[in-house]
Amino acid sequence: MMVMREFRNEFTFRMFSEKGRENEFHSLFEQAIEDAMRDWIGKEYPLYIGDSEVTTESKLTERSPIDGSVICTCQKADRKETRMAIDSALEAFNEWGRISYIKRARLMLKAADHFSKNKFVLAAVLSIENGKNRFESMGEVDEAIDFLRYYSLQMLKNRGYGDAVYLHGTRTKVRLGFHGSPGKGERVSRPMKPYGVFGVIAPFNFPVSISTGMSTGAMVTGNTVVFKPSSTGNMSMLTGAMIYHLFRDAGLPPGVFNYVSGPGTVVGDELATSSSVSGIVFTGSMEVGMGMIKKSYELGQNKAFIVEMGGKNPTIVSDSADLEGAAAGVAAAAFGFDGQKCSALSRVYVQSGIAKRFIELLIERVKEIKVGNPLERDVYMGPLISSEAFERYKWAVELAKNDGKIIYGGNVVKTELNGFYVEPTIAELRHGHELYRKELFLPFLLVDYYESFEDALKMANDSQYGLTAGLYSKRKKEIAAFKDSIKAGVVYVNRYSSATTGAIVGFHPFVGWKGSGLTGKGAGGPYYLLQFMREQSISE
């Protein structure tokens, strides 16, 4: 008899800090940086297709946004290599899709333990790769481990999501049957079965947690994966290669997880249009997500699409709010990882009567943010991910200056590093301005003011997106109205740690409404895995 494990979040830094071992945490992370530089940085990585390592004539060079240094060389796959990976995944599916869900779940739990043993090095590589500070990086790696364990335990808890029922028969006989006619008894099994091959297309900003979560969702339910990391512009190929190695070393059979680096216009397009790919799980922009869906359906393909497509996330600060707590939550949500999160807070609506005091408190918090090399322990904001992000930042700053007012920031931060370092920026603009509609992915917070709470709700909901939203208020009536009316999938009320970011696996399903999602079921929640399977009824 199998004994069910209880799901527990990894919470690495929380564990160290609660035990008074913060210095040990920092020592382990700093040692991990040295290990990462020795074991992972500066190498060339092939494509991993089935049990083969494949190289291509064209290469991709990944550089750290911290200083522009080369951190790895990867392969630039074309459609030929992508089709090889799809064929490999199809072949592996013949066995993987038929083995017991218990075996699959146990293997994923083993992988979780393997990820956990290597989490400091994985987090260190992540910081080098995309410029996150050590706390953000460790939190992301923890989330990847949580996804592995939570989804595996959900499969076990729900017995693979299949069941069986008995339809009792009757003694009455008829010569020709009809709907609902008398007949013999029937045993009806109702399994949930995998689709086949899933293309997993990952973003740059959470290349460990989201990549692992999407891939685990597909694999633990019996599908096989062709995984494409972010490979152009904002690259995250190195952590993708590490994920492959961790799965392989945990015992995942060849072909179940195939790693293919290459441009989205080629590799991603092949996955989206191939008739051999049964589903796509994607995190990224609405433009790219909807484009893939449109192209696939125009080809007459009925793929399963599981997509999360960004946000323009609001928070309301009421005149009854704990303003200190609101300022802390708003600052964290807007400027954590430079605002380069789909859940980041980008617009805040403040009741006019307390606006002056709230802005003062917010600026006090933001002034504490240190910008610089994210590998240093006291740095909160590292570099922007790319020159494109930097140009977008300058454009937004100039537009805000022309059409409104910069309350704080708006400047380049000078460092000795060859990266794009900027100040956290707060701009006062009226709702309806162009910047309220565009997802910036920057440390750029818009502020507007309101008189009535109804107006604040209308402005908060006035967006094509509906991912996360926050409220700070002590009034029960306002809280009730917010919970009843806000059109967002992930909603936080009076959350000190962050107004809109930081969903915890097993507690906050990360689900987008409106243009932020498609299926209405969120990652890290109890219904996520159902999207990777289809029902079947078998009557005997």
Image: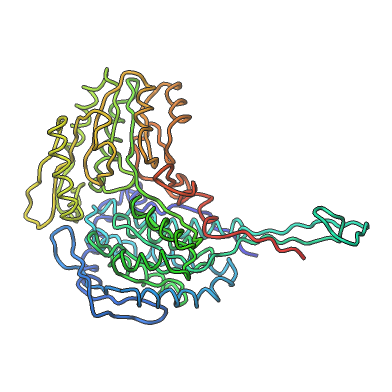
Residue at 35% of width from left, 31% of height from top? 460
Q: Residue 29: percent from the left, percent from the top? A: 25, 59
Among the 4 quarters of the image, the one containing residue 10 = bottom left
153, above or below 402, in the image: below
Q: Residue 220: percent from the left, percent from the top? A: 51, 64
205, above or below 265, in the image: above
Direction from residue 423 to residue 302 in the image, left or right: right
For the C terminus, the image quarter is bottom right
From where the camera sits, is residue 259 visible?
Answer: yes
Which one is nearer the viewer's eye here, 160 or 269? 269
For the N terminus, the image quarter is bottom right
516, above or below 161, in the image: above
Which one is nearer the viewer's eye here, 365 or 455? 455
Direction from residue 9 to residue 352 in the image, left or right: left
Q: Residue 34: percent from the left, percent from the top? A: 20, 67
Which one is nearer the viewer's eye here, 485 or 478? 485
Q: Residue 439: percent from the left, percent from the top? A: 28, 44
